[in-house]
Amino acid sequence: MEASKSKSSTKAKNKYNAINYDSLRIVVPKGRKSELMAVAEAAGDSLNGYVNKAIEERIIRNKPSFLKAYTIIGGVNGTGKSSFAGILKVTKEFFGEVIDVDKISAQEKVFLNEGEKIALLQIAEFLKEERSFTQETTLSGDKTGIIAATAKELGFFIRLYYIGLDTPEECLRRINNRTTRGGNDIGEVDIRRRFKERWKSIKRILPYCDEAFFFDNDNGFVEVAEYIDGELKLKGDRHPKWVLEFAKYLKRTKL
């Protein structure tokens, strides 16, 4: 019975890979394979994941004119999306303009719902002109999925950086701190609703992503998982409660 289940699971995984991935054979000098596997393992990656990242970093470094990327920085309000975007601006080269509804609302002196409308117009322009851009979003609702579907059809490379925290109370505490410094306030009801629905929100967007990385922000941004080859793979020694819950959710619900 167990062998039958294992065979069925392997068959399903092979079918998924055949639909969603292309196979690329690479050749290395004799003896280098074990060396590369050791390097990948030390970095917390599979050999396939490590090679894919190396290729992507080389492409980004050379910045070819044909590469266009849609980068999503996701997370419930208060998890630190804007701070993470600031880090990306410094450490990465190919992310385009960052679209932040909170920042737009403050600059235009409008309510958040009006700021969101302005942001959507900006995104539509980037898609039309096929230029790289980054969006900060809670992933709630259907809008990000619709944007991702359009970007995918246009040939954009889509990556997700998700920022997580263990409790809605921590999100609320950080928002309250931000509000005292003049930042936008977000209603507690909205925060708790988005926190409760966050797994469904991520799952909606993952099928469009070429790569997805998950960071915990309890005490600085720490990468805790990566979604690759249709699986969530934990990374490093630190596995906060929320990423373990998300891993169980994906196994239970299937993608």
Image: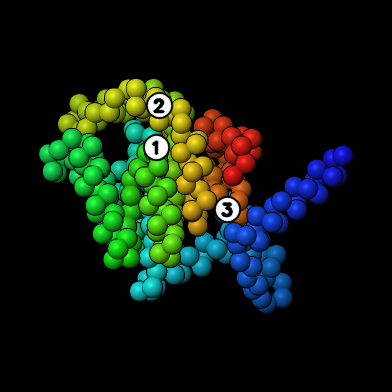
Residue 105 sits in quarter: top left
Q: Residue 153: image x %, image y %?
A: 43, 62
Give the residue type that dot 2 points to. Answer: Arg
Q: How is the image coloured?
A: rainbow
Q: Earlier in the sequence, mark 1 or mark 2?
A: 1
Identify the residue shown where x is 72% and y is 75%.
Answer: 30
Q: Please state if 202 lies on the left or on the right of 30 as rendered.
A: left
Residue at which label 1 appears: 140
User: Tag 1's secondary structure?
Assistant: loop
Task: In the rendered structure, find residue 228 and report the number of the disc placed on it.
Answer: 3
Q: How many marks?
A: 3
Q: Is residue 79 above or below residue 235?
A: above
* Foreground disc of the pair 3, 2: 2
Spatial CA distance of label 3 from label 1 is 23 Å
Give the residue type that dot 3 points to. Answer: Ile
Spatial CA distance of label 3 from label 2 is 28 Å
Give the residue type that dot 1 points to. Answer: Ser
Q: Is residue 185 visible?
A: yes
Residue 62 sits in quarter: bottom left
Q: Earlier in the sequence, mark 3 or mark 1?
A: 1
Circles 1, 2 touching at the beta carbon (< 8 Å): yes
Q: Please state if 16 lies on the left or on the right of 156 as rendered.
A: right
Residue at which label 2 appears: 193
Q: Earlier in the sequence, mark 3 or mark 2?
A: 2
Spatial CA distance of label 1 from label 2 is 9 Å
Q: Nearer the viewer, residue 100 or 32?
A: 100
Q: Is residue 222 visible?
A: no
Q: Residue 131: image x %, image y %?
A: 31, 64
For the N terminus, the quadrant is top right
